[in-house]
Amino acid sequence: MSCATITNIQIQVELLMSTVNKFLALSFVFLVLSSFMLLSVNFANVCAVSKPSVPQFTIKLADYSYDVPPSTTTTTDPYTGKETTITKPGYHVKDVKLEVTIKNQPFTPYTNAGGYVCNVHYSVQVKGHFEEKWDSIAIHIEQSKSQYTVISRPNRYADGSQLDFRVLAEIGYVFEEDRVPPVPPDRHFVAEAVGDWSRVQTFTIPGISSLSPPSQTTNLPQSPTIPPDNNQPQLSDQVQPPSFVFNLPFLLWVGAFLFVGVAIVVVMLFLRRQLKFSVDNNGSSLKRCSYRTKNFGNSGCIV
């Protein structure tokens, strides 16, 4: 092999090493930036959930009472052929409910990074007007697809009772935790954004003559300016949203991406080392070639 050939090989190898070094640097920068972008996007998905607005609602009594008409049944004895007629008198079923009608908020359900569909949910609390303790009569009721969400509960209060109501809106999802059969799954609510409690509305139970017919149409008040209530009780079954860092599908994607990136870097470092070894060998050959040329002429530059 001539000195010119060795020199040419050395130049090509050095150029190739330079290219490999640049590729390693670009790969490292791309790996770091891509990981940062993945974390930023996932974090943005969590933080992009805006706080729901304060719910607007009304309360009323709705009378669903009905009459069951008399009924007559006739049976025939299969052995004697004797007919027996039984007449049951009619009766009245009293069914009076408290109805909380909530005006739905403009919201498009979305699927979060964990694969759960998030929507607006409402919780309703009530207490006697002259007490301090709040009781929940509805927890995490998903917003309906119509204009209003109606929550009704049987009326167990006497005429003249004064009740305070308030409503809370949250954005989140419900997931089920399996338990040992035959125990049904345990349902949990995870909130991704929590709004403020509404203004307290006081409702007085009217007499039977003042009952409203069942209806979902109502005039709702304008959204008031509500000061923050630092004494609001927390819902007992609410689970805080999990941190995005511990989201399993996201971690799997990031782990796979980092593994591939590290593998590429390791392979390129190995190739760089091999090329460097080749350059060192060619450099030694070139030195020997130069020495032979100097002492023996061009005929000595045969490796």
Image (cartoon, rainbow, N blue to C red):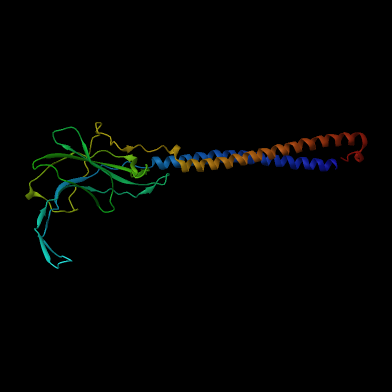
Image location of residue 201, percent across then percent down: 17, 40
Q: Quadrant of the C terminus?
A: top right
Q: Can residue 70 be seen at all in this image of the molecule? A: no
Tell which of 134 and 201 is nearer to you: 134
Q: Residue at x 44, y 41 (%)?
A: 42
Image location of residue 74, percent across then percent down: 13, 65
In the image, taking residue 54 as reference, residue 42 lies left or right, namely: right
Image location of residue 45, percent across then percent down: 41, 43
Q: Residue at x 35, y 49 (%)?
A: 109
Q: Quadrant of the N terminus?
A: top right
Q: Can residue 277 be seen at all in this image of the molecule? A: yes
Which residue extends farthest front? Answer: 79
In the image, taking residue 280 as reference, residue 117 lies left or right, namely: left
Which residue extends farthest bottom? Answer: 81
Tell which of 3 and 72 is nearer to you: 72
Q: Residue at x 81, y 34 (%)?
A: 284
In the image, taking residue 258 as reference, residue 199 lies left or right, namely: left
